[in-house]
Amino acid sequence: MFRRTTLAATALLAAGALLLTACTGGSAPAPTTTAAPDADASAVIRLVLEPGNLDIRETAGAALDQILVDNIYQGLVSRTPEQDIVPALAEDWTVSDDGLTYTFTLREGVTFHDGQELTPQDVVWSLQTRKDTPEWADSARLANVASITADGQDITLTLTQPDSSFLWNLTGRAGLILKQDDTVDYKTKTNGTGPFTLSSWRQGDSITFARNDAYWGDEAKVAEVVFDYIPDNQAALNAALAGEVDAVTGFDANLKEQVEATGDFALVLGQSTDKGTLAFNQASGPLADQRVRQAIRQSIDHDAFVEALASGETLYGPIPSLDPGYEDLSDVAPYDPEAAQALLAQAGVEDLTLTLTIPSFYDTTIPQILVSDLNEVGITLQVNSVDFPTWLNDVYVNKDYDLSFVLHTEAHDFENWANPDYYFTYDNPEVQRLYAESLAATDEAEAADLLAQAARIVSEDAGGDWLYNGASVVAVGTNITGMPSINVNERLNLAELAKSDG
């Protein structure tokens, strides 16, 4: 998973989280038991990637967003798994017709976990400090903010120019509200306004949240939530069957029969914005030729990845179906090995050898399919499996690679294709222009149409390939309700999670 300017992966150390994650509602189905929810229950959820620290101000990575946003920290607005923007610390908001003025009405009676009251000054300080502190994650998302003021409970943000992504940005880290000049050690402690508080962190093992009895909204339905970090899927399956966990995220859909065998669990597939992305280093060499990149795309059987994962759906462009601007682009690069060979011949390329750099935590299925498919058209693919810090340094930072695969999970991240300095090495001024126009649009439909135009160009340029749109795969105990099932690798709002005895 990738933040827009940072990155994420399923072994996130410094930049994100990538899990194999199409497609039901936002939470798991109702339990089969008729027992009433237990308000004193402890619910245990298996996660894959443990954060290195808890400082959501400065530490990148989806492992933090997954558990801390909504549960511990909140902004003026939030978003549902279906990507709808909803009120949070603000009761409501208005946007001026010119798209330059956003006015939020702050709720009254909200307290931080340390008991201190949330004030309008905390909001102004939080947003202004993030804007002015480049070291804080997503500070650039507030770059267009000219002023932030408070008048009673009304918070007004004035922009220098319209930004169709602004409200969305406030649902993420850019909009999180902290206590002014708080002295908490953010690396190991928390102090938010959410429905849970941090109870304990056993590093290398688990993180435990406790219900916030002073929460401003509806209280959490369980007394505590334990995030049990189990990287291995088989170990997670064993823990589920032994009754040690109540829900398993980042699961392998191929284990459906095993996890459902006892009747205590059900496998749930939810939509996600996870994009299995094959990046092409097109700065020089054979991959600088669009015909070679297109040949690679048309040599790949995208259906094979969905079949191998037993989940997800094919994807032929940079925008997944949950995001604005999505269009079915399967016509751009249909599976056609003969057409791929013809393109290579036109480009004068033969006996081509390329290296795929891929983080070692990914299953061997992905490179195996790629090696086989490319071999069919005469391309030899060598696989370089590396640890994630090496991938970050070589691929993400230094752009030293031919092909690379990671799972980008961040929603609304098309901006990476409009950034020629991003590790994708894709540079198209027309795409950059369309993306800028989409940001400046004050009409949502117009903004989405501009994104769709830009995405088609990226796909037609073979700026990269998108092997699949992953699903959120979750195994949920039949005595559990309210477990999210959409985009669980990105955000895991547990306010409605409930557990019964039966």
Image (tube, rainbow, N blue to C red):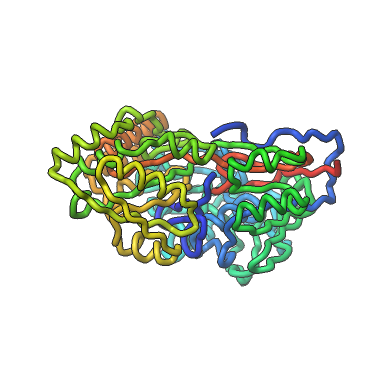
Q: How many badges with numbers are in the image?
A: 0
Residue 372 percent across, percent down from the top left: 36, 44
Question: Image check: 296 left or right of 50?
Answer: left
Residue 277 percent across, percent down from the top left: 39, 46
Question: Image check: 204 left or right of 278?
Answer: right
Residue 474 percent across, percent down from the top left: 63, 43
Residue 434 vs 363, above or below: the answer is above
User: What residue appears at the point 31 percent right and 51 percent down from the top-left corner?
Assistant: 381
Question: Image check: 252 left or right of 364?
Answer: right
User: What residue appears at the point 34 percent right and 54 percent down from the top-left corner?
Assistant: 356
Question: Image check: 149 left or right of 91?
Answer: left
For the C terminus, which image quadrant?
Answer: top right
User: What residue appears at the point 56 percent right and 48 percent down from the top-left corner?
Assistant: 489
Q: Is residue 437 visible?
A: no
Residue 468 vs 16, above or below: the answer is above
For the residue pair 115 and 154, the one nearer the viewer reads as 115
For the residue pair 458 and 11, the one nearer the viewer reads as 11
Residue 250 percent across, percent down from the top left: 59, 48
Q: Which quadrant would residue 132 be assigned to in this image? A: bottom left
For the residue pair 438 and 332, the one nearer the viewer reads as 332
Q: Is residue 355 visible?
A: yes
User: What residue appears at the point 61 percent right and 62 percent down from the top-left corner?
Assistant: 179
Residue 147 vs 308, above or below: the answer is below
